[in-house]
Image (cartoon, rainbow, N blue to C red):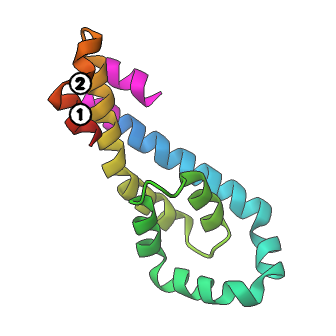
């Protein structure tokens, strides 16, 4: 969807749209995980989760922000696992929005460059390769 929207709307408009949509989707997955499994996980794994819960209560926003900047870790795992923690929903939404913004702009820029291609030769242009790098 980012690819299609980037070709139509351009960098700025699509970055804003995708940023809000991705943060809303992440928060929705977070809330589903929280309301379906939070209490069960906290009861079953309380001794092991005590250290994690303390860390999240003190530095949860920083943990989340750091994880959002690491593209190797799948976002759906972050959404589900943070739903099991005591982080506040508002904090989760704001930090996710900010943390995913950089990656969103990079992906949208690369997709915007793809949308401007006239031929297959343009795939190897310095601008497009730089966008992906």
Q: Nearer the viewer, residue 3 or 86?
A: 3
Q: Quadrant of residue 59?
A: bottom left
Identify the residue at the far left of this view: 126
- On screen, residue 32 versus residue 109, left or right, reads right
The disc placed on residue 71 is none
Q: Quadrant of residue 86?
A: bottom right
- On screen, residue 108 versus residue 88, left or right, reads left
Above or below 19: residue 100: below
Question: Mark 1 and mark 2 in contact (Cβ < 8 Å)?
Answer: yes
Residue 9 lies in magenta, yes or no?
yes
Above or below 92: residue 106: above
For image coordinates 52% across by 46% down, the residue present is: 24
Q: Which badge, 2 or 1, comes first in the chain's sequence?
A: 2
Please rate how many residues cluster around mark 2, counting C-alpha atoms within 10 Å: few if below 14, some from 14 to 19, many from 20.
Answer: few
Disc 1 element: helix
- On screen, residue 69 versus residue 42, left or right, reads left
Residue 60 in the image: state x and y as whole percent.
49, 76
Residue picked out by circle 1: 129
Residue 45 in the image: state x and y as whole percent.
78, 81
Q: Main secondary structure of the magenta part?
A: helix
Q: How many marks?
A: 2
Please rate how many residues cluster around mark 1, counting C-alpha atoms within 10 Å: few if below 14, some from 14 to 19, many from 20.
Answer: few
Q: Which residues are magenta?
A: 1-15
Residue picked out by circle 2: 124
Q: Quadrant of the C terminus?
A: top left
Q: Quadrant of residue 115?
A: top left
Residue 128 in the image: state x and y as whole percent.
23, 29
For image coordinates 38% across by 59% down, the residue present is: 69
- On screen, residue 108 versus residue 93, left or right, reads left
For image coordinates 33% across by 34% down, the residue present is: 108
Disc 2 element: helix
């Amino acid at each position: 969807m980012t690819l299609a929207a980037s070709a139509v709307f351009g960098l700025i408009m699509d970055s804003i749209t995708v940023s809000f949509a991705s943060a809303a989707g992440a928060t929705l997955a977070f809330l589903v995980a929280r309301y379906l499994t939070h209490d069960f996980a906290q009861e079953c794994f309380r001794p092991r989760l005590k250290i994690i819960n303390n860390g999240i209560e003190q530095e949860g926003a920083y943990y989340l922000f750091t994880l959002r900047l690491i593209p190797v870790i799948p976002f759906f795992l972050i959404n589900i696992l943070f739903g099991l923690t005591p982080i506040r929903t508002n904090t989760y939404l704001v930090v996710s929005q900010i943390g995913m913004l950089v990656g969103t702009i990079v992906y949208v820029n690369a997709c915007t460059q793809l949308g401007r291609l006239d031929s297959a030769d343009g795939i190897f242009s310095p601008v497009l390769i730089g966008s992906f790098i």
